[in-house]
Image: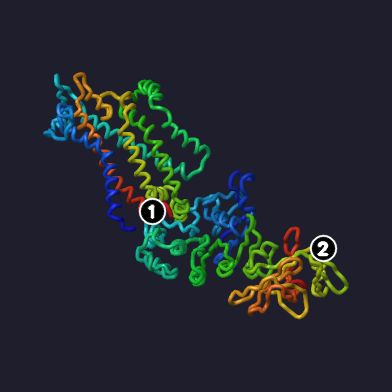
Amino acid sequence: MHKASVLERTLRGIALTLVIFFFMFPIFWIFLMSFQTNETILRVPPSMIFEPTLTNYRSLISGTLEGSTATLEIRFMSNLYNSLFLSVTSVTVGLLLGVPAAYAFAKLKFRGSEDIAFTLLSFRFAPPLLVLLPLTIYFQKIGLADTYLGLIWVYQLIVLPLILWIVRGYFEDIPSDIEYAHRIAGHGFWSTFTKIALPLAGPGIAAAGLLAFIFAWNNFIFALVLASADKQPVTVGALAFITASGINYGQIAAGIMLSIAPTFALALYAQRYLVEGLSLGAVKG
Amino acid sequence: MSETKLRISNIDKFYGAIDHGVHAVKNVSMDVEDGDIVALLGSSGCGKTSTLRMIAGFEEVSRGSISIAGREVHMLPPVKRNVAMAFEGYSLYPTVTVRDNIAFALKSSGKPAAEVAGKVEQIAAMLEISDILDRYPSFISGGQQQRASLARALIREADLYLLDEPMGQLEPQLRTLLRGRIKFYIKERGLTAILVTHDQTEANALADKIAVMEDGELQQFASPDEIKEAPANLFTGTFVGEPPMNVFPAKARSSDQALVFDLQDGSELSFPRSVFARDLHDRIMALQSVMLGVRPYAVQRSETGAQARVLANQWLGDQSHIAAEFAGGALVLVEHDRAALSEGDAITVHLDPSDLHIFDPASGVAVSHGASLAG
């Protein structure tokens, strides 16, 4: 690497600062808001000087929302738990189904394989609202409406095509001869899949899992229509902050901080793993 | 007489639908004896790798059967065929070291660790890769990966060893050394190996028998000497041998004393009739037009003989390759001394009937080979 001149380093520093400021400022502002009351948030002009308070977090965690006129019960923590449960289970189910399917689509050429793969992808073409109405009716008839099972099932529409198409590409990049070498050395199909293909596609599976988790976590419309209050994730539950007596910006901000924490932590963790996996240069020869 | 280790019976390979797809291997049959090294030799796309992959089980056999050590295997998955293979693209497991790559199969078959370690060291020493055993495949050169892949195959105990271009990436000096060592290793243990190569020198040096393939068909399956002395057809004759065999069309004509071949440029080659056995003479006369072949090493300059004009003269450091205009085409001859010839010089060449290969120009099939003319 060549040595950067002082000017070059300064310019690069300024550019990076601008980019970081651009992307991080809203999150930073929300972070500040979460420690303020509605009164200080809505000051004109806004100011960064205020007396920090933990009341927003306290009321979210205790579950009581104190408005200006009345005290409301909110289920933020149970919503957070629902989000976590729905996302983790959906992604787990999606990985269990999607990874072997992706392997089959990548390595086994069978009649109609392209058509099936495309059909699965096409689930993401249709706007969710289009399928929601018939789906609601079906779910009510077969008793899946307002159940975790039903929601996880519908979430597969989001996570499965994503996992399938990302992981398939990674499997396709593994030279078949590496798997042949393993199989000819006395190992079966399953052992080759678990010992050779899975580790080599590891970074891709991690990336797909992470993306699928974020998509599942951010989903709003499916849970809004198909779940009642006790099964709703945070994305839907956050609507509770918009009350008849006003919008509780402080609590919304605290809610946002709490709800992005899991995805944020996961991204930080998986990012390290992704970089490690890719820098080994395992797949490309 | 030794037993047959590998029997390939009338196999066909179609990529795509049978009888409609690309016909990559056409009705190939061969028997490989226990303890033999067989080279599949041919240019790229000739079907040699497809054949090897069918033996390994990575490609389905479209028609025909393959048996290894008396077992029909062409319907079995690779894992059940008990063959070891070194891949052209090396295909080392990227996530483990070279040492673990080589030891992989032995370890998973439950051999004691100490025994495996000893074998790995031994084979690594033979292939000159002892110093890279603890490195990962992506951090070693192509030649080193190739040797690691070869070691991973040879270390196993299998009925059959399949080596796909096993030395293509090695430097010439190392290649010569390893050829000798690998041949010794295989012969010492009495292993049976199929080697795919496009390098004649490698095939000649390693193989007991060479299977020459072209356009999906097996052209000839014989020992290296036999292929050189008695090529079965024009393709084998011109494909095997460096520089390639000279061939030129001729029309045969018979007189009382001589069998005369009229060449394209109006000149003629005349041989005493007594050189040719009666039935051979009759067959040549029945064909009328023939292809004459003569190896560059067998063409000699002499006081009397046919006239030729030098087109080029190259000194390769240990031999001269002289190309001369002859019979309307080019004739190449090889001399071991530096030839003092330059372009345009007239030379006289002598073709001995005992060096002559005669082919049927229509089918390409050999009619006779020099040494057996009178036979």
Q: Identify the coloring.
A: rainbow
Q: Residue A133 location, x and y as percent?
A: 38, 21
Is residue A283 visible in the rendered structure shown here?
yes
* Position of B354 relative to A41 (above/below): below
> Which of B89/B62 is in front?
B89
Q: Considering the numbered disc 2 on the image, is that residue within a helix, a strand or a loop?
A: loop
Circle 1 or circle 2, nearest the eye: 1
Q: Which residue is mark 2?
A: B288
Residue at disc 1, secondary structure = loop
* Furthest residue toward front: A7
Residue B189 visible to an observer of this rendering: no
Q: Quadrant of the C terminus of chain A?
A: bottom left
For badge 1, the amino acid type reads Gly
Question: Which residue occupies 77% across, 76% down?
Answer: B305
Residue A206 placement (x, y as % from top left): 34, 44
Mark 1 crowdedness (10 Å alpha carbons): few <14, some 14-19, many ≥20: some
Q: Nearer the viewer, residue B302 or A50?
A: A50
Please tell me how crowded label 2 is: few (under 14), some (14-19), or many (20+) other residues with Cα within 10 Å.
Answer: some
Residue depicted at x 50% and y 68%: B186
Q: What label sits on residue A281 in the rendered view?
A: 1
Residue A11 appears left or right of B81: left
Question: Marks 2 and 1: in contact by CB < 8 Å?
Answer: no
* Residue situated in front as seen by the camera: B80 or A104: A104
- From the top left corner, tell me how far across and down residue A168 is, in percent: 43, 43
Is A155 placed above or below B294 here? above
Q: Type of residue at label 2?
A: Gln
Residue B17 vertical placement versus B204 (above, below) = above
